[in-house]
Amino acid sequence: MTNTLPTDSVSTSKPELQRDMSLNTLKTNEQQLREEIEALRRETQELTEKDEELKHDIEKIHEKITTAED
């Protein structure tokens, strides 16, 4: 009885496994980047809204100063 190991399938499956792991890593990284981009978009939107509020407040203050000086 001879013990034969399927060396061909092992050697071909190892690169496939590495490729699959690499693809999974890329997909995971891509998902993380998408989440980070979305978080940055939300933060940008929040900052834009705060900026507009501050500009509006500054305009009100300038109007009060101008009115007080007259």
Image (cartoon, rainbow, N blue to C red):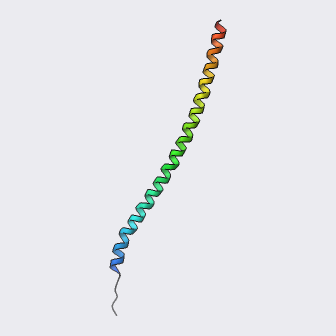
* Residue drawn at (54%, 44%) of the image: 39
Whether residue 11 sits left or right of residue 25 in the image: it is left
Instruction: Determine whether 40 is above or below 2 in the image.
Output: above
In the picture, residue 3 is in which quadrant? bottom left
Q: Residue at x 47, y 56 (%)?
A: 28
Q: Residue furthest top?
A: 70
The picture places residue 66, in percent across and down from the top left corner, at 63, 11
Quadrant placement of the N terminus: bottom left
Residue occupying the point 33% across, 91% down = 2
Residue 26 appears in which quarter of the rendering? Answer: bottom left
Assign the C terminus to one quadrant of the image: top right
On screen, residue 68 above or below 33: above
Q: How many marks?
A: 0
How far across and down, in percent of the image, does residue 57 sit? 63, 23
Residue 54 x/y as whole percent = 60, 26
- Vertical position of residue 32 compared to residue 66: above or below: below
On screen, residue 3 above or below 10: below
**x%, y% of residue 13?**
38, 72
Residue at 60%, 31% (x, y): give it.
50
Is 22 left or right of 31, judged from the image as shown? left
